Image (tube, rainbow, N blue to C red):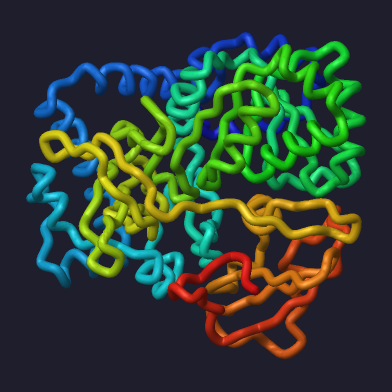
């Protein structure tokens, strides 16, 4: 059995362990953990060494990674046809200039062909999808071999706020926990918070946890963490006092960290925050290395570049995933509008996001605010397998309309409930099929519509 194949088994076992055992396991360094250890250590070394390299060596590192990926991409029908049509010979790619001559790939181009034509049957691949803030879904494969790189780079980001793997986190994402307020995850040494449950009930249960446990970090969607901070301030000032004594920071991901959310979190708990830019396609990971809202891409994670965007006057953010050979992303247009802050010797050093993924909410029957990012993307609904766009409208608390733009006409009597996870939601959910998504005044497909 390939060593990476044991990761899912280890993951399932560790996620289910009780907290006392999980606490002990949290002291086992990732570099020594089964399956993930050796590649995790290698990626950590890459991160450290890359920082010390001169520009020619950095370019050599990037080109070598791209060359390896292109050899794999040529086995994928979509890329084989694309490069032939553009007269591109991947074997001739020997510089960043050569990489810039490769055609840019968009989400729409990938969605226009069947999944199997843009994928390759590598070992241990599994299907996932992403909608992004626009609600436009894309299904693709990833492999467990991407996990070590993800952890090595994320731990580097969190370490800026003093994080070590034995420190307990409180995580606000979209995981469905049923009637439970929290679920302990022994693999990641964290408590996942039920963001669909009434906040007052969650706060009461959190008091029990904090009696003999020190929560060191908050982690999750900025909108959800900010809502938690506001709830603590309003309903549980005693918890604010407790958490102020133990918290060391907050990690904000998956949404653009709007200043209103960030300020609320920092002021209520008197802690620093750090944010990063990433997406499910795993082509780019960038972090606030030196200051707020300026993102430094890890060129050891994937190749990140910018090209002018004449439609907006800004720049397109283009990413290439080094390690995904199952569904390659080569010069992939993320769809985000950015502005380069620094480019050094042809390598993008940092950028600023011009239009970010700010969080929005809907309310259930009790008036509980639920992050739309958590509701729509945190659960990875099967509906993304058949939808081009998913949007949400709410005119009354406790009721939402999910507006679906299908990839192709749906059969009569299509049962949406089988494709959209509603468990644990105190809401009436209706569905509407439209031929085209609803556009904002600026022409953008937004997740929440009026």
Q: Horizontal and vertical percent for residue 384?
A: 60, 66
The quarter of the picture where residue 194 lies is top right
Residue that appears at 88% across and 23% down: 207
Q: Is residue 30 above or below residue 92?
A: above
Q: Is residue 10 visible?
A: no
x and y percentages locating residue 3 in the rendered image:
50, 27
**Which image quadrant is residue 120 in?**
bottom left
Residue at left 40%, top 65%? 107
**Near-viewer residue (336 or 408):** 336
Whether residue 230 is visible here, answered yes or no, is: yes
Image quadrant occupied by the C terminus: bottom right
Residue toward you, 389 or 152: 389
How many numbered marks are there?
A: 0
Q: Residue sitting at 54 percent across and 39 percent down?
A: 253
Q: Position of residue 124 (x, y in %)?
A: 51, 43
Instruction: Give the side of residue 359 with respect to residue 326, left or right.
Output: right
Residue 320 lies, with reference to residue 15, above or below; the image says below
């Amino acid at each position: 059995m390939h060593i990476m194949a044991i990761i899912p088994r280890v993951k399932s076992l560790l996620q289910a362990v009780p907290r006392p055992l999980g606490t002990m396991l949290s002291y086992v360094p990732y570099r020594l953990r089964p399956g993930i250890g050796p590649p995790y250590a290698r990626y950590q070394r890459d991160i450290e060494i890359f920082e010390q390299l001169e520009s020619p060596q950095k370019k050599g590192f990037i080109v070598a990674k791209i060359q390896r990926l292109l050899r794999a991409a040529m086995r994928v029908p979509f890329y084989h046809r694309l490069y032939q049509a553009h007269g591109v010979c991947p074997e001739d790619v020997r510089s960043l200039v050569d990489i810039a001559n490769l055609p840019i790939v968009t989400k729409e181009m990938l969605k226009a062909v069947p999944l199997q034509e843009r994928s390759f049957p590598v070992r241990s691949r599994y299907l996932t999808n992403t909608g992004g803030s626009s609600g436009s879904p894309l299904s693709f494969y990833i492999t467990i071999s991407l996990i070590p790189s993800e952890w090595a780079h994320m731990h580097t980001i969190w370490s800026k706020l003093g994080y070590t793997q034995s420190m307990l986190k409180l995580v606000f994402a979209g995981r469905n926990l049923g009637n439970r307020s929290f679920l302990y995850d022994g693999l990641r040494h964290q408590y996942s918070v039920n963001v669909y449950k009434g906040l007052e009930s969650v706060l009461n249960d959190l008091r029990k946890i904090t009696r003999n446990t020190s929560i060191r970090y908050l982690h999750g969607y900025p909108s959800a963490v900010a809502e938690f901070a506001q709830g603590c301030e309003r309903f549980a000032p005693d918890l604010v006092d407790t958490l102020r004594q133990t918290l060391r920071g907050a990690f904000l991901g998956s949404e653009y960290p709007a200043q209103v959310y960030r300020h609320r979190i920092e002021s209520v708990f008197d802690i620093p925050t750090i944010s990063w830019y990433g997406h499910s396609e795993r082509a780019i990971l960038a972090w606030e290395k030196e200051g707020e809202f300026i993102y430094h891409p890890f060129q050891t994670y994937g190749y990140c570049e910018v090209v002018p965007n004449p439609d907006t006057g800004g720049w397109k953010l283009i990413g290439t995933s080094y390690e995904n050979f199952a569904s390659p992303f080569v010069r992939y247009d993320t769809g985000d509008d950015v502005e380069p802050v620094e480019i050094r010797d042809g390598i993008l050093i940092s950028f600023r996001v011009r239009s970010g993924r700010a969080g929005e909410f809907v309310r259930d029957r009790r008036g509980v605010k639920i992050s739309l990012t958590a509701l729509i993307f945190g659960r990875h609904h099967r509906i993304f397998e058949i939808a081009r766009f998913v949007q949400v409208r709410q005119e009354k608390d406790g009721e939402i309309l999910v507006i679906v733009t299908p990839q192709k006409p749906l059969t009569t009597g299509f049962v949406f409930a089988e494709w959209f996870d509603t468990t644990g939601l105190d809401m009436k959910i209706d569905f509407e099929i439209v031929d085209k998504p609803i556009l904002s005044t600026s022409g953008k497909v937004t997740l929440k519509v009026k």
